[in-house]
Image (spheres, helix red, strand yellow):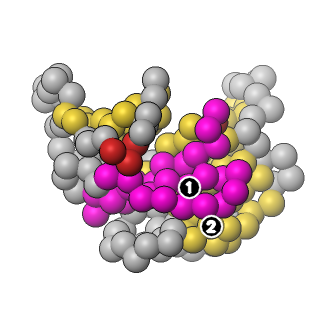
């Protein structure tokens, strides 16, 4: 956003915000920017327009960070189901205004940010921890903790099942 890339949290420095300034190829490190426990270990954030959506650590919440105003909102969205997890990854579909929330207990929750409504999707084939996910070409991909990648078509997502890719990630 604005020729700046934002790196949020991490395993050790989970409260930190790091800004990469593309115009002059420099970094700005802001320690203790976020409250303790706000970010998670996984790729638990997604940028859509000028908002970073950040999955809470060990909480079923999504916090927001407005990149234009630098305002942080705690518990902006609450995941409606009681799921048991330590971290989650987020992926976004800008065209549909959807955020896919994949928890490490294998559950999939879908947030429509235009009307703040939630729905449930099919569980992944396996639980994943410290995982990442991405949305591309109408498919949601999940990777992490194992050497497999699985995906689900987001066209009619509620009736589709997760499928393993045919390629193996082992070295």
Task: Measuring from the top left, give residue 83's x and y in whole percent.
Answer: 36, 72
Structural distance between the alpha carbons of marks 1 and 2: 9 Å
Q: Secondary structure at mark 2?
A: strand
Task: Measuring from the top left, give residue 99's x and y in whole percent.
Answer: 55, 48
Q: Image point 74% across, 63% down: which residue?
A: 72
Q: Secondary structure at mark 1?
A: strand
**Residue 143 appears in the rendering:** no
**Residue 164 appears in the rendering:** yes
Vertical placement of residue 82 versus 105, above or below: below
Vertical placement of residue 27 versus 158, above or below: above
Q: Image point 81% across, 54% down: which residue?
A: 70
Q: Which mark is residue 128?
A: none
Front residue of 156 and 106:
156
Vertical placement of residue 120 versus 124, above or below: below
Residue range (magenta): 95-122
Residue marked by disc 1 = 111
């Amino acid at each position: 956003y604005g020729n700046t890339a934002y790196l949020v949290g991490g395993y050790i420095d989970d409260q930190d915000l790091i800004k990469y300034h593309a115009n002059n190829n420099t970094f700005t490190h802001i320690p203790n920017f976020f409250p303790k426990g706000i970010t998670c270990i996984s790729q638990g954030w997604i940028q859509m327009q000028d908002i970073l959506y950040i999955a809470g650590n060990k909480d079923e919440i999504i916090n927001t960070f407005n990149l234009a105003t630098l305002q942080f909102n705690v518990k902006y969205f609450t995941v409606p189901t009681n799921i048991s997890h330590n971290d989650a990854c987020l992926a976004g579909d800008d065209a549909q205004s959807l955020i896919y929330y994949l928890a490490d207990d294998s559950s999939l929750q879908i947030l429509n940010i235009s009307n703040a409504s939630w729905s449930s999707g099919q569980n992944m084939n396996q639980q994943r921890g410290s995982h990442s996910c991405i949305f591309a070409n109408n498919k949601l991909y999940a990777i992490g903790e194992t050497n497999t990648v699985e995906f689900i078509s987001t066209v009619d997502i509620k009736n589709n099942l997760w499928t393993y890719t045919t390629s193996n990630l082992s070295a």
